[in-house]
Amino acid sequence: MNFKQLTILTFFVVAFTSSYVNAQDNRCENYDAVISNLYSSIETLNVKKLKSINEYLKLRCADNNIETHLLFSGLTIADAENDRSNIELIRDKITASQILDKDNPRFAWHLYVLAQSWFWDAKPDKAVSLLSEYKSYFIGQPKNSIEVRALSLIGGYFNNAKSSLEKEKSSYFEKAEIKANEIGDPELKLYVNFRKGGEAFPNSNTDSVSEFKRKKDKWMNMLDSVQPSVTKAEVLLFWGYLEVEEKQKNLSALQEAIEILLEFGVTRTVIDGSMLYIELLKRYGEAAKVESIIKKLINDHGASLDGYQRKQLYGWLFELSESQERYEDALKYKDEYYLSLIAKDDNTQKKLDELLLEYKVEEQKTASKMLKQSLQLIELEKENEKQKNHILILFVVTLSVAVLLLSIIIYRSQKSKNELQKLAMIDSLTGVWNRRAITLKAFQELAIAQREGHSLTILLADLDNFKSVNDIYGHDVGDIVLKTFANIASDNIRAKDQFGRWGGEEWLFIMPATSVEDAKNLFNRLSNKLSEVKIGDLSNITFSMGAVELVNDRNTDLNLLIKEADKQLYVAKETGKNKVSFVSM
C-alpha cells in the first residue's frame, strides 16, 4: 500500500469514528425515565429543573413523540414566570388540538396543569368548568401523588364554586388525605392540608388561646418535616400574611419563602411574596428597608410585573420619597413609571394622552413642592442665623441650657410631624378613617382578593334625610348623629373589615371574604342599634346602603366597584330608604 492509499484510508477511518462519537453524544438515553422526571418536576413546580429537561428533550429526543410533553411543561414554565404571551398561546394550542384524553397515562398531570393555569390567571370559573367536565375520572380512589394533588385542587375550587359542586368538596379532600397519608410524603400531606385551608389555619381573631396554639403547633410540625419546596414556600407566605407569629418571625417566614421560590424559579410567586414582604415592612414601620427592596424587585423581575404590581411599586417609591421630602427622587420615580408603561404597553393615542396629562399634573405638583421646600430652606437659614446668635449667648451662660432648648425643639418638631401624619389619615369629626385612608385600604384589600381569588364586598352607606336633620335640629345635632353612626359602625364590624367616612353623611365599608348575605346582616345590626338612639327630640334615625360583591370579575378596578355600590345605594333610596340593595359581579 503506497502513501496516497494509506492517507485516504486514514481519512475515512477518522470520519467514521467522529460520526459515531457524535451520534453517541446526541442519543436519547433513558427516555421513559426522562419523561417521568419531567412530570415529577411539573408536579412539584421545579421550574429550573423543568427547563433543563426541556432542553435535553429538544436536543436529543426530537425523534420521539415529545410535542405534548413540551406543551404542558411549557405552560407550567410560562405560568410560573408570568409569561403572558406564551401562556395564552400554549393554552390556545392545547384547546385547539383537543389533547386532553382520559385514556392518556399522563392525563391527570395534563388536567392539573391546565386547571392551575386558569387559577393563576384569576379565572376560577374556567378551572371549575374544566374540572367539572372531567370529574368522573376521579370517582375511584386516587392511584398516585398527582391524582392526590388534582383531587385537592378540585376540592379547593369546588369550595368556592357557586353551585352544587360545593357539596362535593369534602369527599375529594377526604380521598386526597387518605392517599397522601398512605404515600407518606410530608410535602404531599402539607399540600393537601394547605389546599383544604379554611378553618384549619390559626386565627387569633376567632380562635380561643388553646385552639390557636393547637392549630399553630400542628402547622409548625408539618412545616418542620418538609424539605424546601414550592408548597412549603406557599404555606410560609400565607403564614406571614396572616401574621401568626410576632413581627420578626413573620418577616423571616416571608424571606424564607422568597428564597425557596427563587431556587425553584417560580418568578410569579416570588413577585407576589416580595409584594407581601414590602407591605408587612410598611405596616411594621420599617420604611428604611423598603426602597432598596422595591428597586431590586423592579430591576430583577421588571419584565414579569403586571400593570397593577408596577403601579403599586412605583407608587410606594413615590409615596416614600414624598414623605421624606425628597421631591426630586419622587419626580424621578414618576418618570420611570410612565416610561415603563410606554415601553411595555401598546397604548392607543387616547390612553397615551391621558398618561401624559396625568404626568404633567404630577410634575407640576412636585415642582410646586420643590419650590415650597426651597423657600422653607431660605426661611430656615434666616431663622438659623438668629438662633446661632442666641445659642452663642446662651452657651456663655451655660451649655446645659442650650442642650435643653435644642432637645425641646427636636421633641416638638417630631411631635408635630407625628400629629400631622395621623391627622392626614383620620376624619377630624368622627375619629374614623377619612376618604384618603379608606381608599388606600380599599385598594389593598381589592389587590389581595384578586390575587388570592377571595370574595370582597364593598358597601356604601348614607344617612337618610340628613339634610332635614341639620335644617330642623341644627348642625350640632347633625354632628352628634355622624359621631354616633361612626361609633356604632366601628363597634359592629369585624377586626379584618375596614370602615371610613367617604364624605358628608356617606360611609364606605370594605369587607374581605364576605358575601352579600353578610352585608345584609351588618345592615340589620347597624339599623337596630341606630333605631335605639335618641338625641333630644330626634329619634328614628335610619340609613340606606348599597352593596356590591366581587365574585367572578377579577379584572375590575376599585372605581367601578364603588360606582356600582353607589348605584345600589340609589336603588335603596328610591325604593323607600332604610334598606340595603346589593348586586354580585
Image: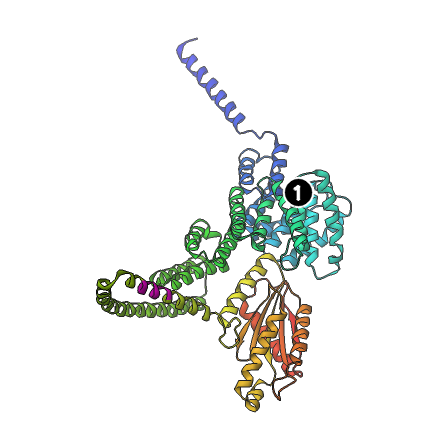
Q: Nearer the viewer, residue 163 or 354?
A: 163
Q: Please tell me in which quadrant of the rendered image residue 483 appears.
A: bottom right
| Residue 393 x, y percent position in the rendering | 21, 66
Report the predominant secondary structure element of the magenta stretch: helix
| Number of other residues with Cα within 10 Å of mark 1, as a class: few under 14, some 14 to 19, many 20 or more | many
Q: Nearer the viewer, residue 353 or 444?
A: 444
- For the point 44% across and 18% down, which residue is it? 11
Q: Tell me: residue 454, above or below residue 116.
A: below
- The extreme front residue here reads 397
**Which element is circle 1 on?**
helix
| Residue 251 x, y percent position in the rendering | 51, 50
- The extreme right residue here reads 140
| Whether residue 482 is visible | yes
| Whether residue 566 is visible | no
Where's the C terminus, which quadrant? bottom right
Q: Nearer the viewer, residue 492 or 516?
A: 492
Residues drawn in magenta: 404-411
- For the point 57% across and 53% down, which residue is it? 88
- For the point 73% across and 61% down, which residue is it? 163
- The extreme bottom residue here reads 472
| Residue 576 x, y percent position in the rendering | 67, 84
| Residue 33 x, y percent position in the rendering | 63, 32
Looking at the image, residue 242 sits to the left or right of residue 294; the answer is right
Looking at the image, residue 375 sits to the left or right of residue 98; the answer is left
Judge whether residue 469 is colored magenta.
no
Where's the N terminus, which quadrant? top left
Q: Please tell me in which quadrant of the rendered image residue 401 appears.
A: bottom left
Q: Tell me: residue 423, above or below residue 166.
A: below
Badge 1 is on which residue? 188
What amino acid is at disc 1? Leu
- The extreme top residue here reads 1
Q: Nearer the viewer, residue 262 or 480?
A: 480
